[in-house]
Image (cartoon, rainbow, N blue to C red):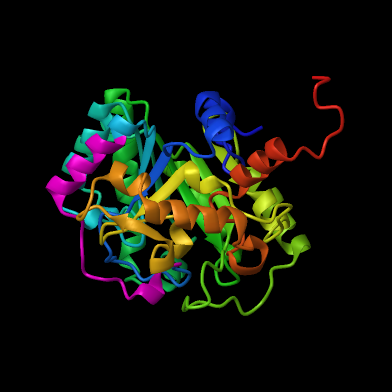
Amino acid sequence: MSRYLFDGHKLMYHPDRVAEYLQTGDCFPLYVEISPVGSCNHRCLFCAYDYLGHPDRRLDSDRTLGLIDELDEGGVRSILFAGEGEPLLHPDLGRMICRSRECGIDAGMFTNGHLLTEDLAEEILPALLFVRFSFNGGSSENYAAIHQVSTRVYEQVIQRIEQSVRIRDRHKLGVDIGAQYVVLPENLDCVCEAAGRLKSAGLDYFVVKPFVQQSSHQGYQMKEALSPSMLEEVFNRLEQLQDRSFTVVIRRNAFEGYGQRNYHHCLGTSFITAINSGGDVASCLPYWDQSDYVYGNIYEASFAEIWHGEKRRQIKQHIEQELEVCRVCPPNCRPHAINEYLSEIRRPTAKHVNFV
């Protein structure tokens, strides 16, 4: 089992919260994804949220700091700063990340890394459990085509990554520094080159995942399927780059089981939630722009009031009892592994479960 467990879940490490859910039917979330801004300085071909129009909005700093305190009081254990935009565009992102650490909440960040200055890296790396760079090209030309930026950005981002590694090593920090590469027909031939370049930059890990069609409104539509034999050939070459200090994670389950589910309804929304750059608290990322799945807004109520409110109760009931996830939800969603686990516990398919 990979140490990073990207294709699985970690509910087994939170038996108290799972027991609460099984006994009462609900619990406070373990994990919250916060989108500090709606805008982005890149225009990646595969962006899951390009149909939102990259709104020029950002969370109010003071309200977000107060929100983090509320999440801590309720028992949230991790916050991911990511979302529909580039989090580094928020001028007070450092304060938010550091407040999370002060509260004892684990903090992680997804970023394209373009704006990670040395001063900002010095501020936030000590407070982060991990930072994962979205890096989806193997050369300056290929990177520019996928991220739709100038060819100069490729080397600029690599310099930011190398700088982060130096800061981490100099201060002996515990932060994991990795990269994620979304495989497309347009960049498959370059993935080994990208991994080799980032290994040289000092990254801890390199994750390869499939493109996910989050919404029919997305601008990118994959024009050709990637054959399993073609993928496996590339993956085998990629894994040869792995050594004791550099981990290559091929999310094979996500590639091979794309869109496959053995459950009918979603049970995972009690454990995770998402807050967009407008302050909406939603069931999950694919639905955070749809009012029918928005529990409330942090500018109108506290997080606890929203979480325990009537609207969320109604949405939760619909998701757990009526929403046919196999028909309407995007494949490989964040709660997928959680749903498999909870569904098996609630309705075991194994015989003689008491013979442990």
Range of the magenta residues?
48-71
Q: Position of residue 167 (x, y in %)?
A: 27, 33
Choose between 307 and 155: the one closer to the eye. Answer: 307
Q: Is residue 139 visible?
A: no
Residue occupying image coordinates x 25% and y 49%: 116
Residue 38 falls in image quadrant: bottom left
Residue occupying image coordinates x 21% and y 69%: 56
The residue most toward the top is 356
Q: Is residue 8 visible?
A: yes
Left or right position of 12 against 117:
right
Residue 311 falls in image quadrant: bottom left
Left or right position of 166 against 252:
left
Q: Position of residue 211 (x, y in %)?
A: 57, 64
Residue 66 belongs to the span the image colors magenta: yes
Eyeballing the image, is 23 above or below 306? above
Residue occupying image coordinates x 44% and y 51%: 313
The residue most toward the left is 62
Choose between 133 and 356: the one closer to the eye. Answer: 356
Q: Position of residue 69 (x, y in %)?
A: 23, 35
Choose between 90 and 21: the one closer to the eye. Answer: 21
Q: Quadrant of the C terminus?
A: top right
Eyeballing the image, is 67 above or below 227? above
The residue most toward the right is 351
Residue 354 belongs to the span the image colors magenta: no
Left or right position of 27 against 209:
left
Left or right position of 290 against 183:
left
Q: Position of residue 6 (x, y in %)?
A: 57, 42
Q: Quadrant of the N terminus?
A: top right
Choose between 103 and 293: the one closer to the eye. Answer: 293
Residue occupying image coordinates x 56% and y 28%: 19
Give the number of marks: 0
